[in-house]
Amino acid sequence: MTTTFNSLRIRAYRIWFIGMTTSNLGMWIQRIAQDWLVLTVLTDNDATAVAITMSLHFLPPVVLLPLTAIVADRFDRKKTLVVTQGVQALLAVALSVLTLTGTIELWMVFVLSGALGVAAAFDQPVRQTFVSELIPVLYIGNAVALNQTSFNAGRLIGPGIGGLLVAAVGPGWAFVVNAFAFAGTLIALTMIMPSARDIPLRSASAASIREAFRYINGTATLLLIFVMMFFVSLFGLNSAIFIVTMTRIEFELDASYLGYFTSGMAVGALIGALFAARRGQPRLRHVVIAAGCLGVTFLAAAIAPGIWTFGMSLALLGTAIMTTTASANGFIQIHTPPELRGRVMASYLAVLSVAAAIGALIAGPLIDAFGPRWATAIGGTGGLIAATSALVWLVSVRSYRLSWNRNRRWRIRFAPEPEAGF
């Protein structure tokens, strides 16, 4: 087995990976179906309604940060995941019943999206840090990247299935599939016995998130990553709203094409995740370069003249988004002590969520006012701002400079003097 799949050598992580992939598949089926339900069944191509649905899902991790951070570091992560995954399954059942019986209304989708956001707010930081209980610290970077591979395996297959299900039998059955998909994670959790290798210290200090804030603020590179990912997430995590509106409004296509486009983006994301897994330990430069590429590929998607060029630009966008997020996630976990990792990751996910919620509320009205192309072009500014801010910091604080040396393999080098790792 190559270094790309090192973490899969460990039985507990292998079981978790399989269960998580099943759950991710169902989640992407539901996400596509829900966006289409709101845009075409419950409204008349109202992008703002889709944006509100998305923002209601993203806001709970911000509002509940003090609680989710405590839970991530203080309580048994395996038991917590059983509860959060079970609640999300029940919410999928509720959404499917309401849709299939024809009683679903827009406000109900808003409520269920908010409730799902609450469950996910507790689930995500625990799920991210649970990996550290299954594998050695040396494999964390690889495991984080493989987690993203699992996420994008679902993202690759799920939208295509979701689009076909919506086109054939309606969105209600897509929600039913997601409800059953949660069984994969729940079964995996019953089979896993976590190692005592990196289980958090459940002391009284775990009750304070201020300790995590002090650590982030006192670690310059972590703080820079947080700032960068705020701008990346502002629009990068809302790519779904750009894709669904470009499909429906700009190209006037049906739900099956939405599935194809999203799967095309997932192909690129899967490639990015595999590259990140093979690379191993992420470094700051990986995040900076990927964020810049993310901004450029957003612009390419905005000006794509036809469905084929749009699909290809989405594949490149998927690679850029996944490389950025996988590198940032792995960097943070590797550079955070185990006893703080849950709280730091909860803080990180809250930053992503608040940025995504703000971005969704900006993107919806922009699409309604100027069309999806202009909104997608504006979406590219997040990645460009992130990369630019990092470069400014490196030049002004770390004294990075461009240099030329014909004796090196790479003659042009961007590094501090004296030369150090980047």
Image (cartoon, rainbow, N blue to C red):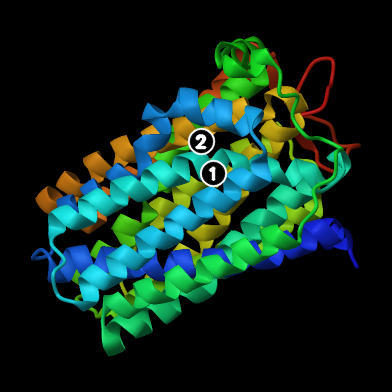
- From the viewer's perspective, tell me whether residue 47 is left or right of residue 239: left
Position above or below: 174 against 365? below
Are the residues at dot 1 and dot 2 in contact (C-beta closer than 8 Å)?
A: yes
User: Circle 1 sits on which residue?
Assistant: 124
The image quarter containing residue 224 is: top right
Callout 1 environment at 10 Å: few (<14), some (14 to 19), or many (20+)?
many
User: Circle 2 sits on which residue?
Assistant: 349
The residue type indicated by label 1 comes to Gln
In this view of the protein, which residue sits in the foreground, 105 or 282? Answer: 105
Q: What element carries label 1?
A: helix
- From the viewer's perspective, tell me whether residue 218 is left or right of residue 103: right
Rendering coords of residue 34 (x, y %): 29, 65
Callout 2 environment at 10 Å: few (<14), some (14 to 19), or many (20+)?
many
- Measured in 3D between alpha carbons, the distance from the residue under mark 1 to the one under mark 2, in whole angstroms, is 8 Å
Residue at figure coordinates x 44%, y 53% from the top left: 87
- Residue 319 visible in the shown view: yes
- From the viewer's perspective, tell me whether residue 418 is left or right of residue 289: right
The residue type indicated by label 2 comes to Leu
The count of marks equals: 2
Q: Which residue ends up furthest to the bottom in the rendered image?
A: 168
- Residue 355 visible in the shown view: no
Mark 1 or mark 2, which has the lower sequence index? 1
